[in-house]
Amino acid sequence: MSSRVSDETGKGSGEIARLLSYIVLLATSGGLFWEATAIPTSRFEVLGAGAFPMLVHGCLIVLLVSAITSSLRRLPASAYAQFAGDFQAWLKARQLVFVLFVCLGLYLAMMPVIGYSIATFVFLAVLQFWFAPKTKSAAATVLVLAIVFSVGLNWLFDEVFNVFLPRGV
């Protein structure tokens, strides 16, 4: 009985999430359809290179509009309020994943500016300090690993593989 109640309480916010995913997919498919119209056509082909992508994305657009209207009809009245709370809980449960992606984005953005060695050292040190136990031995291990992987991999690629990683400053 309790599983049925929990299924019914999450149903409204699940429908909102599904509706939002349909809208994102519709916008993406519309953008890709628009981009497919810009593919140059050959004078030897009747349809051109953009015909198949336009056909696929046109079908997706029709299906997604149908799915959106169907999803809007099934939405309970309390779904929007319930979705806000469920979304907050979902974000909190996946906080570490978002921290990892933010750090990865900053790492990739800073690597050309400050160089591979410094960017990799900072990236690895920050993430390992975030996830590792807060002890002195763990901190020493974090620093050693960050130095080895930043300077060591730079040396390996430079001397052994003759692949030069971004130098930066």
Image (cartoon, rainbow, N blue to C red):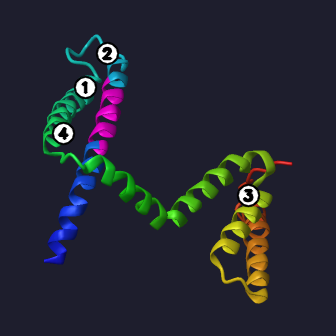
Determine which residue is flagged by label 3: 162
Q: Quadrant of residue 87?
A: bottom left
Is 35 magenta? The answer is no
* Label 2 with label 3: CB-CB less than 8 Å: no
Using the numbered discs, state the Cα–Cα distance from disc 3 to disc 1 in whole angstroms: 44 Å
Left/right of residue 146 with respect to residue 95 in the rendered view: right
Determine which residue is flagged by label 2: 41
Determine which residue is flagged by label 4: 72
Q: Horizontal and vertical percent for residue 165?
A: 73, 54
Determine which residue is flagged by label 1: 54
Q: Earlier in the sequence, mark 2 or mark 4?
A: 2
Q: Quadrant of residue 163?
A: bottom right
- Position above or below: 141 against 152: below
Q: Which residues are magenta?
A: 20-33
Q: Earlier in the sequence, mark 1 or mark 2?
A: 2
Left/right of residue 142 with respect to residue 16 in the rendered view: right
